[in-house]
Amino acid sequence: MRPKPPAGTVLARLDDLPDPGARASAWEGGAVVLIRRGVTVTAFTNLCPHAGLPLCLPDGRGLLHAGETLVCPVHGASFDAGSGDCTGGPAAGDRLTAIAVEIVGPEIRAV
Ligand code: FES
Protein backbone atom coordinates (compact mmCIF):
# COMPACT_ATOMS: atom_id res chain seq x y z
CA MET A 1 0.00 0.00 0.00
CA ARG A 2 1.35 3.37 -0.97
CA PRO A 3 1.31 6.30 1.46
CA LYS A 4 -1.06 9.22 1.17
CA PRO A 5 0.65 12.60 1.02
CA PRO A 6 0.45 14.75 4.13
CA ALA A 7 -1.62 17.92 3.83
CA GLY A 8 0.32 20.68 2.13
CA THR A 9 2.58 18.35 0.14
CA VAL A 10 3.35 19.83 -3.27
CA LEU A 11 2.56 17.08 -5.77
CA ALA A 12 3.26 18.95 -8.99
CA ARG A 13 3.07 22.30 -10.70
CA LEU A 14 -0.06 22.83 -12.74
CA ASP A 15 2.05 23.71 -15.77
CA ASP A 16 3.83 20.34 -15.57
CA LEU A 17 0.61 18.48 -16.42
CA PRO A 18 -0.70 18.06 -19.95
CA ASP A 19 -4.16 19.56 -20.45
CA PRO A 20 -6.12 17.41 -20.67
CA GLY A 21 -3.84 14.70 -19.43
CA ALA A 22 -2.54 12.55 -16.61
CA ARG A 23 0.88 12.24 -15.01
CA ALA A 24 2.49 10.66 -11.97
CA SER A 25 3.64 12.99 -9.20
CA ALA A 26 7.31 13.40 -8.44
CA TRP A 27 6.40 12.84 -4.79
CA GLU A 28 7.37 9.38 -3.47
CA GLY A 29 8.49 8.19 -6.88
CA GLY A 30 5.12 8.58 -8.58
CA ALA A 31 2.84 7.48 -5.74
CA VAL A 32 0.02 9.72 -6.96
CA VAL A 33 -1.52 10.07 -10.40
CA LEU A 34 -2.77 13.58 -11.19
CA ILE A 35 -5.39 14.22 -13.85
CA ARG A 36 -5.79 17.69 -15.28
CA ARG A 37 -8.81 18.92 -17.20
CA GLY A 38 -8.46 22.67 -17.58
CA VAL A 39 -8.29 24.18 -14.11
CA THR A 40 -9.69 21.02 -12.53
CA VAL A 41 -7.26 18.50 -11.08
CA THR A 42 -8.17 15.17 -9.51
CA ALA A 43 -5.71 12.83 -7.86
CA PHE A 44 -5.62 9.16 -6.98
CA THR A 45 -3.20 6.66 -5.52
CA ASN A 46 -1.15 5.42 -8.45
CA LEU A 47 -2.18 1.81 -8.12
CA CYS A 48 -4.71 -0.09 -10.19
CA PRO A 49 -7.13 -2.02 -7.98
CA HIS A 50 -7.10 -4.94 -10.42
CA ALA A 51 -3.59 -6.24 -9.78
CA GLY A 52 -2.01 -3.50 -7.68
CA LEU A 53 0.25 -2.25 -10.46
CA PRO A 54 0.99 1.41 -11.37
CA LEU A 55 -1.56 3.27 -13.44
CA CYS A 56 1.14 5.31 -15.16
CA LEU A 57 3.79 4.23 -17.63
CA PRO A 58 7.42 4.00 -16.43
CA ASP A 59 8.10 7.48 -17.83
CA GLY A 60 5.26 8.90 -15.70
CA ARG A 61 2.66 9.41 -18.39
CA GLY A 62 -0.92 8.43 -17.69
CA LEU A 63 -3.27 7.36 -20.47
CA LEU A 64 -6.25 9.71 -20.43
CA HIS A 65 -8.79 8.79 -23.10
CA ALA A 66 -11.03 11.53 -24.49
CA GLY A 67 -10.13 13.72 -21.53
CA GLU A 68 -12.44 11.75 -19.26
CA THR A 69 -11.19 8.20 -18.76
CA LEU A 70 -7.94 7.02 -17.21
CA VAL A 71 -6.89 3.72 -18.76
CA CYS A 72 -4.61 1.29 -16.94
CA PRO A 73 -1.73 0.39 -19.28
CA VAL A 74 -1.42 -3.16 -17.92
CA HIS A 75 -4.76 -4.84 -18.72
CA GLY A 76 -6.86 -1.90 -19.88
CA ALA A 77 -9.22 -1.22 -16.99
CA SER A 78 -10.81 2.21 -17.34
CA PHE A 79 -11.66 4.71 -14.61
CA ASP A 80 -13.71 7.89 -14.52
CA ALA A 81 -11.28 10.80 -14.24
CA GLY A 82 -13.49 12.61 -11.76
CA SER A 83 -14.76 9.93 -9.41
CA GLY A 84 -12.21 7.17 -9.94
CA ASP A 85 -15.01 4.64 -10.44
CA CYS A 86 -14.13 1.77 -12.74
CA THR A 87 -16.05 2.11 -16.00
CA GLY A 88 -14.84 -1.01 -17.77
CA GLY A 89 -12.34 -3.83 -17.89
CA PRO A 90 -11.03 -6.23 -15.28
CA ALA A 91 -11.43 -3.90 -12.28
CA ALA A 92 -15.21 -3.70 -12.70
CA GLY A 93 -16.98 -2.83 -9.46
CA ASP A 94 -13.87 -1.30 -7.95
CA ARG A 95 -12.59 2.27 -7.78
CA LEU A 96 -9.39 4.24 -7.39
CA THR A 97 -8.36 5.69 -4.04
CA ALA A 98 -9.01 9.43 -4.23
CA ILE A 99 -6.60 11.99 -2.80
CA ALA A 100 -7.95 15.47 -2.09
CA VAL A 101 -5.94 18.23 -3.73
CA GLU A 102 -6.13 21.97 -4.20
CA ILE A 103 -4.50 24.36 -6.60
CA VAL A 104 -2.56 27.07 -4.81
CA GLY A 105 -1.03 29.53 -7.24
CA PRO A 106 1.06 27.44 -9.63
CA GLU A 107 1.14 24.36 -7.38
CA ILE A 108 -1.06 21.33 -6.78
CA ARG A 109 -1.04 20.46 -3.11
CA ALA A 110 -2.51 17.66 -1.03
CA VAL A 111 -5.28 18.79 1.28
S1 FES B 1 -3.39 -4.00 -13.34
FE1 FES B 1 -4.70 -2.46 -14.15
S2 FES B 1 -6.10 -3.55 -15.37
FE2 FES B 1 -4.82 -5.09 -14.53
Image (cartoon, rainbow, N blue to C red):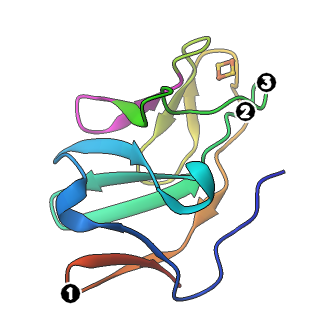
- Identity of the residue drawn at 29% across and 78% down: 107
* Nearer to the camera, 22 or 87: 22
Give coordinates of residue 87: x percent, y percent.
53, 29
Give coordinates of residue 32: x percent, y percent.
56, 54
Please tell me the numbered disc located at residue 105: 1
**Residue 105 drawn above or below residue 106:** below
* Nearer to the camera, 92 or 5: 5
- The reply to whether residue 31 is in sight is no
Whether 68 is among the magenta residues is yes
* Number of marks present in the image shown: 3
Choose mark 1 or mark 3, whichever is in front: 1
- Specify the amino acid type for callout 2: Gly
Quadrant of ligand 1 in image? top right
Q: Which residue is mark 2?
A: 93
Is ligand 1 less than 8 Å from the beta carbon at label 3? yes
Q: Which residue is mark 3?
A: 51
* Nearer to the camera, 61 or 43: 61
Choose mark 2 or mark 3, whichever is in front: 3
- Identity of the residue drawn at 58% across and 21% down: 77
What is the spatial separation of the Cα atoms under label 1 and label 2, in whole angstroms?
Answer: 36 Å
Q: Which residues are magenta?
A: 64-72
Q: Does residue 48 appear to the left or right of 70 in the view shown?
A: right
Q: Quadrant of residue 55?
A: top right
- Specify the amino acid type for callout 1: Gly
Q: Quadrant of residue 65?
A: top left
- Identity of the residue drawn at 37% across and 33% down: 61
